[in-house]
Image (spheres, grey):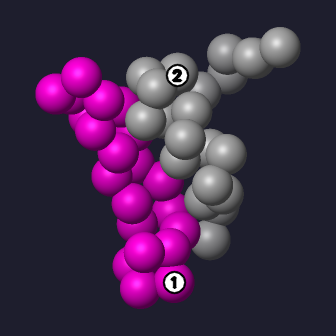
Amino acid sequence: MMQLSDRIMVLSHGEVSGVINSKDATREKIGLMMLGVKEGIEIA
């Protein structure tokens, strides 16, 4: 998916949790977005 698209929109709990450029996307970032974690929040 990251190689086929320019941008990725992630949904969490029926709401858009974020849109990320595929160049900046990592599996970890997408996974956190899927969990509903907002940018700037650190997970320990």
**Sequence-first tag of 2 and 1:** 1
> Do callouts 2 and 1 mark residues in contact (Cβ within 8 Å)?
no
Judging depth in this view, the residue of 1 and 19 nearest the camera is 1
Under mark 1, the amino acid is Gln
Which residue position holds label 2? 38
Q: Residue 8 colored magenta? A: yes
Q: Secondary structure at mark 1?
A: loop
Q: Residue at x 24, y 23 (%)?
A: 13
Q: Is residue 9 left or right of residue 33?
A: left
Quadrant, the C terminus: top right
Label placed on residue 23: none
Q: Which residues, given as a range, are shown in magenta?
A: 1-22
Location of residue 22 in the rendering, given as x and y in whole percent from the top left corner = 53, 69
Q: Residue at x 59, y 27 (%)?
A: 39
Location of residue 37 in the rendering, given as x and y in whole percent from the top left corner = 52, 21
Q: Residue at x 67, y 45 (%)?
A: 28
Quadrant, the N terminus: bottom left
Which residue position holds label 1? 3
Q: Residue at x 40, y 66 (%)?
A: 7
Instruction: Determine the image quadrant of residue 27.
Output: bottom right
Under mark 2, the amino acid is Lys
Location of residue 34 in the rendering, given as x and y in whole percent from the top left corner = 43, 35
Q: Residue furthest bottom?
A: 4
